[in-house]
Image: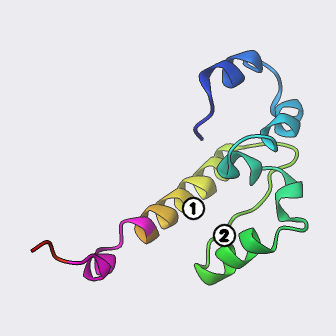
Amino acid sequence: MLLRKDFNASYGDMPYKKKIQHYYGQNPLAQSLHPRAYENNPSFRRLCETHSLEFQAYPDSFTKTDIESRQKLYLDIAKIIWNPTHLDLIPDEE
């Protein structure tokens, strides 16, 4: 996950369960680790449903299995962003 260097450094060795509270105030990918990201957030939930993205909160821990699941999610996001069929939507230069 990408976080500002100063933010990340300030919480360095803090246990994940304490850090998670602070992630909610960061970028959307960091926010999505926190359960509140899924409350009263229809745009985010619609994005997940539209693209079948398996976002989930990790409120208590972030295990190796969780990291692997998150890695798959990031790969799914990359496939959406860099989908070659989207090139057809870009007008040709004349």
- Using the rendered view, name the quadrant where residue 57 is placed: bottom right
The image shows residue 2, relative to residue 48, as above or below, that is above
Which amino acid type is shown beneath numbered disc 1?
Leu
- The answer to whether the residue labelled 1 contacts the one labelled 2, judged by CB atoms less than 8 Å apart, is yes
Between 54 and 4, the one lying in front of the other is: 4
In terms of sequence position, does the residue under pointer 1 or pointer 2 come before the other?
2
Left or right for 92, reference 76: left
Q: CA distance from mark 1 to mark 2?
A: 6 Å
Relative image position of residue 28 (x, y in whole percent): 69, 52
Q: Main secondary structure of the magenta part?
A: helix
Please name the residue shown 54% across and 53% down the image.
71
- Residue found at the very far left of the displayed protein: 94
Please name the residue that numbered disc 2 is placed on: 54
* Residue drawn at the location 83% of the way across and 68% of the way down: 41
- Looking at this view, is 18 or 92 the one in front? 92
Residue 81 percent location from the top left of the image: 43, 66
Give how far across and how far down residue 65 sits, in percent.
Answer: 66, 51
Which image quarter holds the N terminus? top right
Magenta-span inclusion, residue 84: yes
Identity of the residue drawn at 80% across and 41% down: 25
Secondary structure of the residue carrying tag 2 is loop
Q: Which residue is mark 1?
A: 73
Magenta range is: 81-91
Q: Is residue 47 above or below residue 9?
A: below
The answer to whether residue 37 is left or right of residue 73 is right
